[in-house]
Amino acid sequence: MTTADPDRGDHGDDHGDEPAIAVSHVGICVSDLAASLRFYCEGLGFTEEANHEVGEEFATLMEVEGVHLRSRMIRRDGITLELLGYEAPGTVGSAERRPMNQLGLTHLSLRVGDVESVAAVIESLGGTVVWPTRTTFAFGGTSLDFLYCTDPDGVRIELMDLGR
């Protein structure tokens, strides 16, 4: 299988029957696009790379009739997130934190230098800090520190300080 590196503008080159594959982005449905942009960009250091208006042309692909949404592509450290702000038909589901053993994507993990200071920023921008998940222990002479938080819509974010 051929791989591609889109960061270098490489979309792969097909050899035989093997398709080129490159990770593009991960999408997150948000209830308030402006608040989520502020959370991820101002709070976590992502930068807005592109924006799109999405309509009926994507209804079949997205399996959402009457779809109209605003999409914002944000990027940090080679990872692109797509924030999806539905104007129609609106969002569904709960903004509660999902159990870690629920099938599907579980969390976004961030390496940080100071768990408590990043947690304070998350809380100040509408996220939630789940203090009972704080876990610290020594490993190979280094102190490791972990904490789960959520974005304003309940997406779990792991903060991890792996020491130096």
Image (spheres, rainbow, N blue to C red):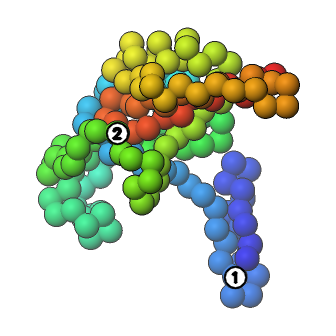
- In the figure, 63 relative to 97: above or below? below
Label 2 or label 1, whichever lies nearer to me, is 2
Q: How crowded is mark 1: few (under 14 residues within 10 Å), some or many (20 or more)?
A: few
9 lies left or right of 127 = right
- In the figure, 149 relative to 9: above or below? above
Quadrant of the image occupied by residue 156 = top left
Q: Where is residue 68 in the image (x, y as percent from the top left)?
A: 21, 51
Q: What label does residue 100 carry, if any?
A: none
Helix, strand or loop status at disc 1 = loop
Please report the residue visible at 58 percent of the width from the left and 28 percent of the height from the top. 135
Residue marked by disc 2: 97
Helix, strand or loop status at disc 2 = loop
Residue at the right extreme, as displayed: 141
Please report the residue visible at 26 percent of the width from the left and 32 percent of the height from the top. 32
Please report the residue visible at 30 percent of the width from the left and 63 percent of the height from the top. 62
Q: What residue type is labelled 1?
A: Glu
Q: Can residue 69 be seen in this view?
A: yes
- In the figure, 51 relative to 101: above or below? above
Q: Which of marks 2 and 1 is nearer the N terminus?
A: 1
155 lies left or right of 136 = left
Q: In which quarter of the image is the N terminus?
A: bottom right
3D distance between C-alphas at marks 2 and 1: 39 Å
Quadrant of the image occupied by residue 18 = bottom right
Q: Position of residue 132 (x, y in %)?
A: 45, 25
